[in-house]
């Protein structure tokens, strides 16, 4: 049932070569792709799926807390999740249930597993294994987030084009955790026509995801996304923020004010002084307090990130305002350096920030795909 995968040695070679020369890691992944019998694969070559390839239409993030007193339950759970990921994204999807998914297309399903900061807090003797990028209150404003929507020992990111297939995947992962871990929070997200090749739009109507390292830009991925050393080598960090967008305040702002807050045109996504969406944006063409100016690499010591934001709609807040916004997701090699300082700048100077309320979030270590015979994260806990 397992799809062909690369050995750990090949995978790590891919990481090292990618970091030095670029190109190799993705070529290894491409080789795995051409060897795979089906379009959906549990892992993206040496890496977990659901990171670099373009986004799907639907997202569910599910965070779990361990409640078992037995440390041995953690590898047990990770082994069953590993088998489940292979089964869910493999050729025989009904192997682990009684056919609930019968007749539904896989729809580019991916499952990504990450480990939260609290997993390394000492309850399970893992304190010394904590990856350097996970630290309590790593990001500014973490202390103001709602704990019921934040953190968690484990995170699964499930994405796919069919909402029901995504549901079943999350449901089965939850079932496999029964008695060991329970759901802490869940966040659903959606995008319109994510697979069309066009940049999706956020709920403010702007194209979102234009500036991102390309899937074949190995040098940029090696520099900004993959961790270069330590137990998480070749993996990455998933940084999540649940950001409510103040839709009513936005609706009261003119198009001109909106475009000056973002720093790009709403309709076409180009710079304010002309050019199309894909034209490189010169720093001086964006207003000083605009979002794209403050987030631009030239204003952030060259920092870039792989963004994978989704829209969410959770009804209304207690005040009757729309509880809708962005499940902001990005993958980075160093959360504090790449995301922390940008969040501080945004909070202090960004015009767009006036329309945003950060309500939840977390940072999660995402290890490589498991080596043959191993489970997800085994390397991290050995
Ligand atoms: C609801 C919150 C947010 C909204 C509505 C939003 C919207 C946008 C839009 C419309 C763009 C321009 C198009 C593009 O390049 O994708 C953009 C770019 C960008 N955003 Fe955000 N964003 C949000 C939150 C964040 C956060 C929290 C971060 C980082 C901590 C961030 C980092 C970036 C970066 C790095 C760029 C690319 C800048 C460049 O190189 O030109 N954004 N965002």
Image (cartoon, rainbow, N blue to C red):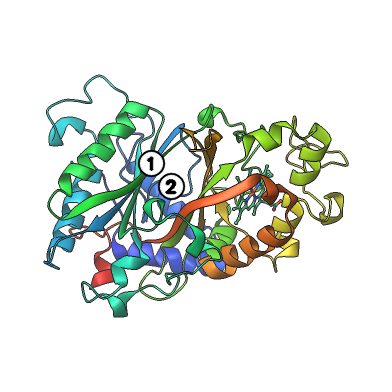
Tell which of 8 and 309 is nearer to you. Answer: 309
Depicted 43 relative to depicted 248: above or below: below
Locate residue 40 relative to residue 97 in the image: left or right: right
Tell which of 365 and 22 is nearer to you. Answer: 365
Q: Position of residue 328 (x, y in %)?
A: 53, 48
Tell which of 2 and 204 is nearer to you. Answer: 204
Q: Is residue 204 visible?
A: no
Instruction: Determine the secondary structure under disc 2.
Output: helix
Among the 4 quarters of the image, the one containing residue 151: bottom left
Depicted 354 relative to depicted 235: above or below: above
Q: Position of residue 356 (x, y in %)?
A: 62, 47
Among the 4 quarters of the image, the one containing residue 159: top left
Depicted 34 relative to depicted 298: above or below: above
Q: CA distance from mark 2 to mark 1?
A: 6 Å
| x 86%, y 55%: residue | 284
Q: Position of residue 168 (x, y in %)?
A: 26, 33
Q: Is mark 1 within 8 Å of ligand 1?
A: no
Label 1 crowding class (10 Å Cα cut-off): few <14, some 14-19, many 20+? few
Q: Position of residue 37 (x, y in %)?
A: 29, 36
Q: Is residue 172 visible?
A: yes
Q: Quadrant of the C terminus?
A: bottom left
Locate residue 244 relative to residue 57 in the image: left or right: right
Q: Which mark is residue 61?
A: none
Residue that numbered label 2 is attached to: 30
Depicted 368 relative to depicted 192: above or below: below
Q: Which mark is residue 34?
A: 1
Tell me whether the residue at label 2 lies in contact with that at label 1, contact meaning CB atoms closer than 8 angstroms: yes
Locate residue 315 relative to residue 140 in the image: left or right: left
């Amino acid at each position: 049932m397992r799809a062909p995968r690369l050995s750990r040695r090949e995978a790590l070679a891919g990481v090292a070569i990618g970091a030095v020369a670029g190109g190799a890691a993705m070529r290894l992944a491409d080789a795995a792709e051409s060897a795979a019998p089906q379009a959906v694969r549990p892992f993206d070559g040496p890496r977990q799926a659901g990171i670099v390839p373009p986004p799907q239409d639907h997202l569910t993030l599910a965070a779990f807390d361990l409640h078992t007193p037995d440390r041995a339950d953690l590898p047990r759970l990770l082994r069953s999740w590993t088998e489940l990921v292979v089964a869910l994204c493999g050729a025989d999807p009904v192997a682990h249930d009684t056919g609930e998914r019968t007749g539904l297309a896989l729809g580019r399903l991916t499952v990504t597993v990450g480990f939260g900061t609290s997993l390394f807090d000492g309850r399970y003797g893992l304190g010394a294994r904590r990856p350097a990028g996970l630290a309590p209150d790593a990001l500014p404003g973490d202390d103001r987030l709602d704990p019921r929507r934040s953190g968690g020992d484990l995170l699964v990111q499930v994405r796919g084009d069919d909402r029901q297939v995504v549901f079943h995947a999350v449901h089965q992962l939850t079932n496999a955790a029964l008695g060991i871990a329970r759901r802490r929070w869940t966040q659903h997200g959606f995008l319109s026509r994510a697979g069309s090749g066009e940049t999706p739009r956020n709920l403010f109507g702007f194209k979102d995801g234009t500036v991102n390292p390309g899937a074949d830009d190995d040098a940029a991925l090696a520099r900004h996304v993959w961790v270069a050393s330590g137990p998480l080598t070749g993996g990455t960090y998933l940084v999540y923020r649940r950001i409510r967008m103040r839709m009513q305040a936005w609706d009261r702002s003119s198009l001109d004010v909106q475009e000056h807050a973002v720093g790009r045109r709403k309709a076409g996504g180009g710079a304010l002084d002309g050019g199309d969406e894909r034209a490189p944006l010169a720093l001086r063409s964006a207003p000083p307090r605009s979002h794209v100016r403050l987030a631009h690499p030239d204003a952030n010591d060259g920092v870039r990130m792989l963004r994978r934001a989704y829209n969410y709609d959770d009804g209304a807040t207690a005040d009757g305002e729309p509880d809708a916004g962005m499940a902001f997701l990005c993958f980075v090699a160093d959360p504090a350096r790449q995301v922390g300082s940008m969040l501080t700048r945004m909070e202090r100077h960004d015009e767009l920030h006036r329309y945003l309320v950060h309500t939840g979030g977390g940072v999660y270590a995402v290890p490589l795909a498991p080596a043959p015979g191993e489970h997800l994260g085994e390397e991290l806990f050995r």
